[in-house]
Image: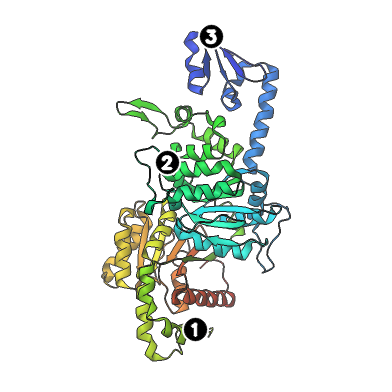
Amino acid sequence: MKLSYNGKYFILDCTYSERHVPKELGFSFDPKSSKWYTKDPMKAIKLRSHGDEELSQKFKQYKRYLRRKVDESKILSSDIEIPKPDNGKDYFPFQRGGIKFLYENKNVLLGDQQGTGKTIQVAGLINLLDDPKKILIICPNSLKMNWERELKEWIIHDLPIRICDTINFSMGDGITIVNYEAFRNNTTRGSKNYTKPKHGGKYNNTELILREIKKNKTVDLLVLDESHNIKNYQANTTRNIFKLSKWVDRKILMSGSPMLNRPEELWTTIKLLGYKDEFGGTKKNFGYRYCDLHETRWGWDYRGSSNLKELQIKLRTNFMIRRTRKQVLKDLPSKSRKSVTVEISNAYKKHLDGYDKIVADLGKLSNKHDPENSIFSGINPKYIGDIAEIRQIVGQAKIIPTYEYTKEILDSGEKVVLFAQYHRVLDSYKEKFKKYNPAFISGKVKNELRQAEVDRFQEDDDCRIIILQFDVGSVGYNLTESFNVVFAELHDVPLIMNQAEDRCNRIGSVNPSVNHYILAHGTLDARMGKRIIEKQEVFDKALETDRL
């Protein structure tokens, strides 16, 4: 075999009996010259021993280039000057490195592991951009308000931020936040699956959104949060996002788990970011190289995997930045809190309407710093029963958005500890998360059975979530298999919340814990969450330790 390079292609001259070598490496065959060829140096470098000295030097340069690009995709710090808000907030060193990567590369997969602050890095990029006008953020419905809150805390530009949905979408100057469902209508006219407009209109809702985006000509930045939601190219949502991408200058796809199950799921990401030629040009070529593609009696099977090391190097050297929590551990606090504001349905809002006067009469929640006191201490006792009813209604109202939010964490491959208070709510979560084989501890579970549920969560990989009632699950148990604690409901005593947070933050824990407070927008629940977190931070400062 002899390998050469003509300035465009690597060409391999080999015998007929040696043809399996270039074929397995993904070379193409030219029948006119009876030679094999490829543009991809990553394929050719595996045959470097068959080239001359000049080619050997070229491959050495290429290997140095690969090492440099891979190192850049793992960047842990940067001295780049990034504008920051004047509220005392600052970026972690690894976030500065991530912002630098986003700034220097127009189309990026931000694949940092969950809990490392990807939203803040996007905000940092926006701060670094010179006079951005139009930014479109597409995310799961449960994250829209969280995006709004984070951006308001971090953005220095005077940009309006609007939350939209399928009905009320508008795309002007500023930041528009919309959920994936807004793009789910079939917009292919003439197709038997075309989504007909409602109420005799000319266009369906997704068509109206695409026309609104097209009217604005250029979108400076498109962000897809939890971008694995577009892994299926046949889905209407994915196809419509591809349609709008032609008007976009920069793209950031965010996902701590861009490949949930197999390499095939990366193809839409590769294609949307504009790198399909670097990965074979077609899905079939990509499948042959990285999905162990083969034909069965039912058709082509993309469910396999192959050449995964090469695939990772290609992702990192072309468009992906990914840092794990382990890599950035020194920058992260021993535990952190994240307020996740969600919208509840109109039906539940109507249930709460009758309590408006009571909530208004409550005045300020307790501001005493004693963490053992309820935040309702000092409230007129006549309101206690009404407060309990409000909390139960809100707890049920948050079930769907909390499930959607928690499911994203679970689907990224992480385990979750979930706390709630009322039995009806706890039982609903047990049913909702059935496919994740949940462990479950409430006051109804006998004492002698509770430790077995903890052991199952700690030792069984198939047991992905443990659901706990505050009064019986906030003390005593070590749940170090997870670093994610989701508070589907809140306890009114800050000390109990603190104890619940520390179920994952124990001896043997590897990662700092992340505590996700799910708060219902505009309700007593949101006020409770704000006050509890304030008290927790006072508690932390008074009794600061690293790991318990």
Q: How far from the left and from the top, in percent, is residue 42? A: 58, 27
Q: Residue at x 45, y 49 (%)?
A: 206
Q: Residue at x 54, y 65 (%)?
A: 336
Between the C-alphas of marks 1 and 2, the distance is 47 Å
Which residue, given by chain and number where applicable, does mark 1 sit on? Answer: 365
Camera-side residue: 194 or 22?
194
Q: How far from the left and from the top, in percent, is residue 297? A: 29, 26
Instruction: Name the N-terminal-most of marks 1 and 2.
Output: 2
- Taking the image as shown, residue 231 lies to the left or right of residue 316, namely left
Q: Residues within 10 Å of mark 2 (few under 14, many from 20)?
A: some
Q: How crowded is mark 1: few (under 14 residues within 10 Å), some or many (20 or more)?
A: some
Which residue, given by chain and number where applicable, does mark 3 sit on? Answer: 34
Could you say whether the residue bearing mark 3 is in a helix, strand or loop? loop
Q: What residue type is labelled 3?
A: Ser
Q: Which of marks 1 and 2 is in front?
A: 2
Instruction: Name the N-terminal-most of marks 1 and 3.
Output: 3
Which residue, given by chain and number where applicable, does mark 2 sit on? Answer: 232
Between the C-alphas of marks 1 and 3, the distance is 81 Å
- Taking the image as shown, residue 77 lies to the left or right of residue 259, namely right
Q: Which amino acid does label 2 sit on?
A: Asn
Camera-side residue: 409 or 180?
180
Give the vertical position of 510 relative to 230 (above or below).
Answer: below
Camera-side residue: 242 or 124?
242
Give the vertical position of 401 relative to 137 (above or below).
Answer: below
Could you say whether the residue bearing mark 1 is in a helix, strand or loop? loop
